[in-house]
Image: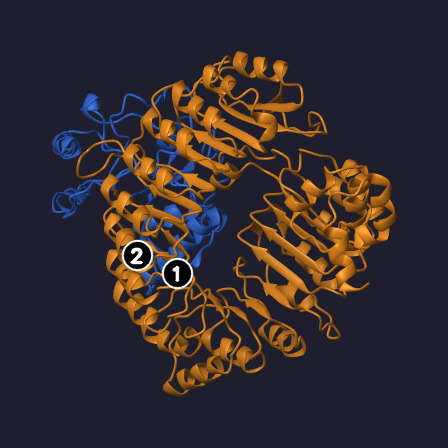
Chain colours: A orange, B blue
């Protein structure tokens, strides 16, 4: 097919249907559409006309399902016959913070059974917040001979036995990515289950696991997988062992080190630094558990090319971070702990002009005698030095309206602004006023804002601002905020692109809930917990909007009329049948 | 600042507060007084009228100026806040522990009726069952299984520990990492006193 012919078929919008059919044989259309990767583009394409709907569904190889209950596996299989890669998300996001009851659902097994029948050539499965058992992993391992990539993020219900099954049976595996899951770690022998003949692994991430693995087996595995580009080790791997691995894998692009704290001799330091300097492709570095400042200079050779540095498990001090960042001019993404304090963040502003994403996590959650952490000063310092900043997640102990106004003035391109002032309902610490003007400044200035998390003392005014200005907002998280139903009503009425709304501990009641009646079908989901919503309000919603699933999770000992936790989502699969007794479907 | 005023009032009342602590364990108070921080980092709920908190158990409890007679605020009263994944919380706790107590985490263990105390290294254990088994072996007694509702009901013994505030807490209620970071000593209570705990 000549490139010019392809271009012509895309650029002829004015032909009538019959002419179109003759210049657009299905194979051509499918060929063109197969170049489309974005699932949103594909959704748009499928709405054009029946021909395009069919061409799209036959050419689609990857399906993304943002809420596993919005559709059933049978419906998916019926519409898309040629899927080779599936991404599925399950539980509501607040399950990460223990707000969702055990056994809530989102079990992968029913999906696997259908996939085994309809997509025997399935290659990739990426799951987020799903429940997955060892039996399911074993079933997966033996049912799909071409299986290549497994990625599990924030999932639970499985143990290292399941991983052993994957390692044993998946002969073509290229990716095993186990991230931040509730995994039952029964030991590291799973890693030894990769057969000696197995050489295809490109991505191996077991940083999540704590048990010791057989290092010899790992060394041999890394040695024979010449295409490996991502290797994220767990804490049990020592610095000395790391050096031995790197010598055999200089092609690595992403490295997660193991523990970074053992005592090294001078010679061992030199060897480590030398091994790292041979890794010319390395652009991402993480791990660095228990990192001791004195060994960080070994990293300098790779720092020059680093674009993503994840120090969120290394409790560095401000001076240690500053020294390290002086060698990282090309950094685009940085994750740190708040042990670096404002001074450390000043160093970020001074050394990383290309920075686009910053995440600052809190270190000491349980120890109240030590006041660490970052304040508004650190954030402001970063904003002066990093004008390209567009993604921030910031856990702090204090903030002011003026600081946020300055920050967004310096960085107007925010797409993701997640600010967590850790003391619920805390006001501006200088003026003692609510933080309304801070978030007002954010939504007024950052017109590209897609995701917003608010915190601190907030009245309905914040939500008036959000409703009026945040026209591109898709995801909003609210906790301990607002004064009345009016706040939520403003958001439901004003944010036309809203897809996900999660609210906890706010004074929003039935009027607020019902103000979004028309809106929920265009959204993925709504979560409201510890608000003023009642069972009657939920029943009314369920009655008025039959295509929504309205689920209420009751807590022990709460009033019968209160709807403690409400989860509302659109679905073409109808109400789910696997809900546990604590979840009521209305 | 309002919070600071409360703080000082609470300290006065603590002197007369009834506690289960062993004699001579009111040592944290001087520490508290000299705490140089201006900001009270305790996760107390502020006095905001806008937030409704009555209905759900996952909402915050109101402390503050209305509540002069209450004990100092507990550490973690809000479920799921701040919004950090448990995996990360657990990692950081054990990370901190490794950093601070490089030499092992020895705490005294007393058993009611025993002539002398023992010491154990908490760092050696990774979970409650492991710890309880070790205690059972060391003292040749049976503690049994923990249940959220009933503690160690059915056993003659109840394992308790003294936390940073000087309060005696039942072993097993809080996440392991949190227990490790706040446990100062252990006491295995026996007999009727122990059974009383089980029914609380």
Residue A139 on image: x %, y %: 77, 50
Residue A360 higher or lower than A321, as above or below = above
Q: Which residue is mark 2?
A: A382
Residue A370 appears anywhere in the view = no
| Nearer to us in this view, B186 or A555 | A555
Marks 1 and 2: in contact by CB < 8 Å?
yes
As measured in the structure, the alpha-carbon distance from the residue carrying label 2 to the one carrying label 1 is 9 Å
Residue A485 higher or lower than A228, as above or below = above
Write the residue at 49% across / 79% down.
A243
Q: Which residue is mark 1?
A: A355
Quadrant hosting residue B121: bottom left
Write the residue at 43% across / 82% down.
A273
The image quadrant where one finds the N terminus of chain B is top left
The first of marks 2 and 1 along the sequence is 1
Residue B33 on image: x %, y %: 12, 43
The image quadrant where one finds the C terminus of chain B is top left
- Horizontal relation, residue A451 to residue A293: left or right: right
Residue A141 on image: x %, y %: 76, 56
Residue A260 higher or lower than A499, as above or below = below
Q: Secondary structure at mark 2?
A: helix
């Amino acid at each position: 097919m000549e490139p010019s012919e392809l271009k012509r078929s895309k650029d002829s919008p004015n032909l009538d249907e019959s002419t179109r059919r003759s210049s657009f044989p299905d194979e051509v259309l499918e060929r063109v559409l197969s170049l489309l990767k974005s699932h949103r583009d594909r959704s748009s394409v499928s709405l054009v006309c029946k021909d395009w709907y069919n061409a799209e569904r036959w050419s689609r190889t990857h399906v993304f399902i943002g809420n596993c209950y919005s559709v059933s596996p049978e419906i998916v299989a019926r519409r898309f016959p040629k899927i080779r890669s599936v991404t599925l998300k399950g539980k509501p996001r607040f399950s990460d913070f223990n707000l969702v009851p055990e056994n809530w659902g989102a079990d992968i097994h029913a999906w696997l059974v259908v996939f085994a029948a309809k997509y025997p050539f399935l290659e990739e499965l990426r799951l987020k917040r799903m429940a997955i058992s060892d039996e399911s992993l074993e079933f997966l391992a033996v049912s799909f001979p071409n299986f290549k990539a497994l990625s599990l993020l924030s999932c639970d219900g499985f143990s290292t036995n399941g991983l052993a099954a994957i390692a044993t049976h998946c002969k073509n595996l290229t990716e095993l990515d186990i991230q931040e899951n509730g995994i039952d770690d029964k030991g590291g022998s799973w890693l030894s289950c990769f057969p000696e003949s197995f050489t295809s692994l490109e991505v191996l991430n077991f940083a999540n696991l704590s048990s010791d693995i057989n290092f010899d087996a790992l060394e041999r595995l890394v040695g024979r997988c010449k295409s490996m580009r991502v290797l994220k080790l767990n804490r049990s791997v020592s610095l000395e062992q790391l050096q031995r691995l790197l010598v055999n894998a200089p092609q690595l692009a992403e490295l997660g080190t193991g523990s970074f704290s053992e005592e090294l001799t001078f010679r061992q330091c030199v060897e480590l630094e030398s091994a790292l300097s041979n890794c010319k492709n390395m652009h991402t570095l993480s791990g660095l558990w228990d990192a001791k400042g004195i060994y960080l200079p070994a990293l300098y050779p790779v720092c020059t090319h680093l674009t993503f540095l994840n120090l969120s498990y290394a409790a560095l001090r401000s001076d240690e971070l500053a020294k390290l960042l002086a060698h990282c001019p090309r950094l685009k993404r940085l994750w740190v702990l708040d042990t670096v304090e404002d001074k450390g963040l000043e160093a970020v502003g001074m050394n990383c002009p290309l920075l686009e994403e910053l995440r600052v996590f809190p270190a000491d959650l349980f120890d109240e005698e030590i006041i660490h952490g970052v304040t508004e000063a650190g954030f402001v310092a970063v904003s002066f030095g990093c004008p390209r900043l567009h993604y921030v997640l910031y856990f702090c102990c204090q903030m002011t309206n003026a600081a946020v106004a300055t920050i967004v003035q310096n960085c107007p391109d925010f797409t993701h602004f997640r600010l967590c002032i850790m003391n619920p309902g805390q006001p501006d610490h200088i003026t003692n006023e609510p933080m309304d003007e801070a978030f007002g400044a954010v939504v007024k200035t950052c017109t590209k804002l897609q995701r917003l998390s608010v915190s601190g003392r907030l009245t309905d005014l914040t939500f008036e601002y959000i409703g009026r200005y945040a026209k591109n907002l898709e995801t909003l998280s609210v906790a301990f905020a607002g004064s009345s139903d009016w706040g939520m009503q403003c958001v439901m009425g004003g944010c036309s692109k809203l897809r996900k709304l999660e609210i906890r501990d706010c004074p929003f009641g039935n009027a607020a809930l019902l103000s979004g009646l028309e809106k929920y079908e265009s959204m993925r989901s709504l979560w409201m917990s510890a608000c003023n919503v009642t069972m009657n309000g939920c029943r009314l919603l369920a009655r008025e909007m039959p295509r929504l699933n309205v689920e209420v999770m009751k807590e022990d000992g709460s009033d019968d009329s209160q709807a403690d936790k409400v989860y509302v989502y659109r679905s073409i699969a109808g109400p789910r049948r696997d809900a546990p007794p604590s979840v009521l479907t209305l | 600042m309002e919070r600071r005023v409360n703080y000082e009032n609470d300290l006065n009342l603590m002197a007369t507060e009834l506690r289960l602590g062993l004699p001579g364990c009111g040592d944290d108070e001087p520490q508290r007084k000299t705490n140089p921080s201006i900001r009270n980092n305790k996760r107390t709920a502020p006095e905001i009228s806008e937030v409704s908190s009555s209905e759900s158990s996952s909402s915050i409890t109101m402390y503050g100026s209305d509540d002069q007679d209450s004990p100092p605020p507990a550490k973690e009263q809000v479920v799921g806040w701040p919004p950090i994944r448990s995996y990360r919380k657990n990692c950081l706790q054990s990370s901190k522990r490794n950093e601070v107590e490089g030499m092992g985490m020895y705490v005294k263990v007393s058993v009611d009726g025993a002539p002398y105390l023992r010491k154990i290294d908490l760092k050696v254990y990774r979970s409650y069952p492991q710890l309880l088994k070790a205690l059972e072996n060391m003292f040749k007694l049976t503690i049994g299984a923990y249940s959220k509702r009933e503690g160690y009901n059915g056993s003659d013994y109840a394992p308790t520990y003294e936390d940073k505030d000087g309060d005696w807490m039942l072993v097993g209620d809080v996440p392991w990492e949190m227990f490790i970071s706040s446990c100062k000593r252990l006491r295995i209570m026996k007999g009727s006193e122990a059974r009383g705990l089980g029914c609380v």
